[in-house]
Structures are given as structure tokens and as C-alpha cells.
């Protein structure tokens, strides 16, 4: 396992982090039943393979993730780092404390190494974290030893990640954000965080496992250099000098073993491989642009459809052949803050978008096709 300095925390962390939101489960009468024994075995195997960063959250795995993690790490709690999160239901200092107390109890520990303001945007940070005293309370709890490091996980417009870091005035020590070979929107924020001495953890490096599905297009990004699509995805993330940890939500023992093996590869991509990767990405973006350039001239849609974003998801299927990933993302539309818009089924065939499209694309037809393919 490879280890790196984690910002200015003074800690060394494994390049691979264990994301505890996809523990193995079976469907019983339409309900997920999580396998505690298999989950604990995976946690212990990850520790044996050198993973020292474990990330959970209050609602993961139907609210069972923290307690499963707590049981799984009992024998080595003092040798690893635990990260969990304060959900957005907390709006002030008192509710922040109550959320932390609940997490500590479920985890069976007396402290959290990294406590995140969870999935925040700039407005929540200003209105609740700053104005309602949550950040000040976090500092107090850090002085008491209940929190070792103050962190935040980010879901907002990419430019707002930089604004949150600025307004945090050096108190925020690490950040968790989305980043993978298909979604590079947070690159500037990652670079800025690194420049401020923050530790950077990325979620979704393998797109919730979906980028790990076999894809000749993904593997062709590094032809002859990798054994799987997952390896391309992880090596791409590891190659960013601003990224310390790639957090992978693993649901099977083979995921733990494969990802740990990739994270143990000390060889970064060469300059030639970097150039090859970038050239292939540019070519794929060119192909995607034949369907939609993302110019946004078609916006706003009167029905609240984010047309360019939806066509981006369709291009994951059409250009990169990672259909499961595209469908998984499509299903989050209207259900998560960063996809706060309607899916393609909301189209009423008004045609306003087509009158503004410089490419004269048959947008209404493409929306129908997109929904038919991605809503399966």
C-alpha cells in the first residue's frame, strides 16, 4: 500500500480509502438486508492490506454503516482513521453536537478523526455553519478531543468549493469531493485545496463501481498498461498530485483485493501516458460534442430540464459505453441537491430549446431517446 502526507494534518494516509456506504446486501422481500459478517470480513481484509482510512455516514446502508464499521475495527481502532459526517438536518451548534454524540455511540469510539459538514454547498455553509455557530462549535469539540480534524464534503457548483475554503479561513483541514475520469469538474477546487495545505479525498473514483465495469473505451485510454477499467479509473485519480485518498465504496471482497493492489502500484503514469490519456479524452469529448457541445444556449428549459447535463449522461452510454454508470446517475435526478432538475420525461415537446440550438440538434427526439435508454 502506498501512503502520502495528508495535507497539514501531520498524518500519513493510504492512497485507498474504504467507503462504507455499499456493504454487501441481499434483497429480501423488496428490502435490503446487509450482511454484517461479510462486511466485517471486508473491513478486516482492507486493514490487512494496508488501508488506514475508513469513511462512513449516519444514513449509509439504511443507517447501519456506522455500527457495522464500529464492530469491524474493534481490534485495530487505534491504528486507523475514522471519518463520518454531520448531516444537513443539523442547522445549529446544538444539533451539530447531538449528531456527533449519536455517531460516537454507534461507532463505539470516543472520538472521530475526521468529522465532516456533509455534502454542503456555499449557502448552507454561510447560513448554518458560519452564522449559526457550527464551525465555532467544531473548534470547541476539537479542543476537547472529540473531533481530531474538521472537514467538509462538497456537492455544489465547482467554483463554490473554493469559496467555502476561503470562508473557512484555515479552520477546515480536509475536503471530500467528487472526481473521476468522467467528471473532472472539481479539478480547480482540488488544486486550490492542495495549495491551502488541505488534505483531499475524492469520492466516486470508480463511479460507485460502475466505472469498473468492462469498457473497451475506458481501457483504451491506457492501452496495454492496465488490466481493467477500474485500474484506469483509479490510476487516473492517483495521478492528480492534489489527491491524497481515493475513497472507494466496496461491496465485495474482490473489490477490496483489486483496489488495494492498484493502490499499491508505486509507479505514476509517465509523461507519455499522461499525454496519451489526455489525447484520448479530448477525442472522446469531440465525439460527445457531435451529440451536444454543452454550450447551454438551449437553457433555461421552461419545464425545468437540464438538457446539457442529461445529454452528458447519455454520452457516457453512447461514447464511453458505461451504460450502468449513466443509468445510475440518471436515477439520481431530482433526488440529490446537485441534480436539482427534472429528467427527460418532463419534456412537453414545446420546441423552445431547438429554436436556440446553434447546432440545430433534434433535442426533443434526443430527450425521448435518452429517457428510453437511461430510465431502464
Image (tube, rainbow, N blue to C red):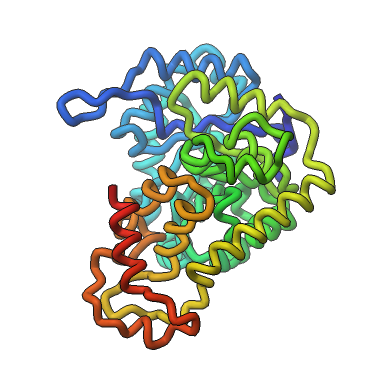
> Where does residue 98 sit, x and y in percent of width and height?
34, 42
Q: Nearer the viewer, residue 14 or 330?
A: 330
Position of residue 342 measured from the top left corner of the image (x, y, whole percent): 29, 65
- Position above or below: 372 against 11: below
Extreme residue in the left direction: 29
* Residue 229 image point, x, y percent: 58, 37
Q: Nearer the viewer, residue 128 or 51?
A: 51
* x, y percent for residue 24: 37, 24
Q: Nearer the viewer, residue 28 or 313?
A: 313
Q: Is 343 placed above or below 89 here?
A: below
Q: Say which quadrant the N terminus sits in.
A: top right
Tell me how many marks there are: 0
Residue 144 seen anywhere in this rendered image of the structure? no
Q: Is residue 73 left or right of residue 95?
A: right
Can you tell which quarter of the image residue 270 is in? top right
Furthest residue to the bottom? 355
Identify the residue at horizontal 49%, vertical 70% (top origin): 292
Residue at screen point 25% across, 28% down:
32
Q: Residue furthest right?
A: 271
Q: Does any portion of residue 37 appear in the rendered image?
A: yes
Q: Quadrant of residue 52?
A: top right
Q: Residue at x 79, y 38 (%)?
A: 268
Q: Quadrant of residue 269?
A: top right
Amino acid at each position: 500500500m502506498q501512503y502520502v502526507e495528508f495535507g497539514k494534518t501531520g498524518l500519513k494516509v493510504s492512497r485507498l480509502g474504504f467507503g462504507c456506504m455499499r456493504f454487501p446486501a441481499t434483497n429480501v422481500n423488496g428490502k435490503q438486508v446487509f450482511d454484517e459478517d461479510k462486511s466485517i470480513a471486508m473491513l478486516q481484509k482492507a486493514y490487512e492490506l494496508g488501508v488506514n482510512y475508513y469513511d462512513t455516514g449516519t444514513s449509509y446502508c439504511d443507517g447501519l454503516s456506522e455500527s457495522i464499521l464500529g464492530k469491524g475495527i474493534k481490534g485495530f481502532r487505534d491504528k486507523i482513521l475514522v471519518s463520518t459526517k454531520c448531516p444537513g438536518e443539523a442547522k445549529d451548534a446544538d444539533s451539530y453536537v447531538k449528531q456527533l454524540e449519536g455517531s460516537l455511540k454507534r461507532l463505539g469510539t470516543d472520538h472521530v478523526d475526521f468529522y465532516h459538514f456533509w455534502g454542503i454547498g456555499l449557502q448552507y455553509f454561510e447560513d448554518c455553519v458560519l452564522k449559526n455557530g457550527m464551525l465555532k462549535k467544531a473548534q470547541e469539540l476539537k479542543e476537547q478531543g472529540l473531533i481530531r480534524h474538521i472537514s467538509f464534503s462538497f456537492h455544489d457548483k465547482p467554483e463554490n468549493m473554493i469559496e467555502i475554503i476561503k470562508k473557512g479561513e484555515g479552520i477546515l483541514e480536509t475536503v471530500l469531493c467528487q472526481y473521476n475520469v468522467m467528471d473532472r469538474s472539481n479539478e480547480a477546487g482540488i488544486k486550490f485545496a492542495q495549495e491551502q495545505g488541505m488534505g483531499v479525498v475524492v469520492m466516486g473514483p470508480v463511479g460507485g463501481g460502475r466505472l469498473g465495469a468492462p469498457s473497451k473505451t475506458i481501457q483504451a485510454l491506457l492501452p496495454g498498461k492496465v488490466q481493467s477499467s477500474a485500474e484506469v479509473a483509479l490510476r487516473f485519480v492517483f495521478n492528480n498530485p492534489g489527491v491524497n485518498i481515493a475513497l472507494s465504496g466496496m461491496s465485495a471482497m474482490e473489490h477490496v483485493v483489486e483496489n488495494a493492489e492498484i493502490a499499491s502500484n508505486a509507479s505514476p503514469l509517465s509523461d507519455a501516458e499522461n499525454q496519451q490519456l489526455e489525447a484520448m479524452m479530448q477525442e472522446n469529448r469531440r465525439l460527445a460534442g457531435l451529440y451536444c457541445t454543452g454550450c447551454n444556449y438551449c437553457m433555461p428549459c421552461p419545464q425545468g430540464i437540464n438538457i446539457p447535463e442529461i445529454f452528458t449522461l447519455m454520452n457516457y452510454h453512447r461514447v464511453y459505453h458505461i451504460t450502468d454508470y449513466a443509468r445510475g446517475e440518471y436515477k439520481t435526478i431530482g433526488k440529490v441537491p446537485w441534480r436539482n432538475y427534472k429528467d427527460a420525461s418532463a419534456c412537453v415537446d414545446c420546441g423552445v430549446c431547438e429554436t436556440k440550438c446553434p447546432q440545430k440538434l433534434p433535442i426533443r427526439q434526443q430527450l425521448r431517446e435518452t429517457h428510453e435508454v437511461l430510465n431502464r
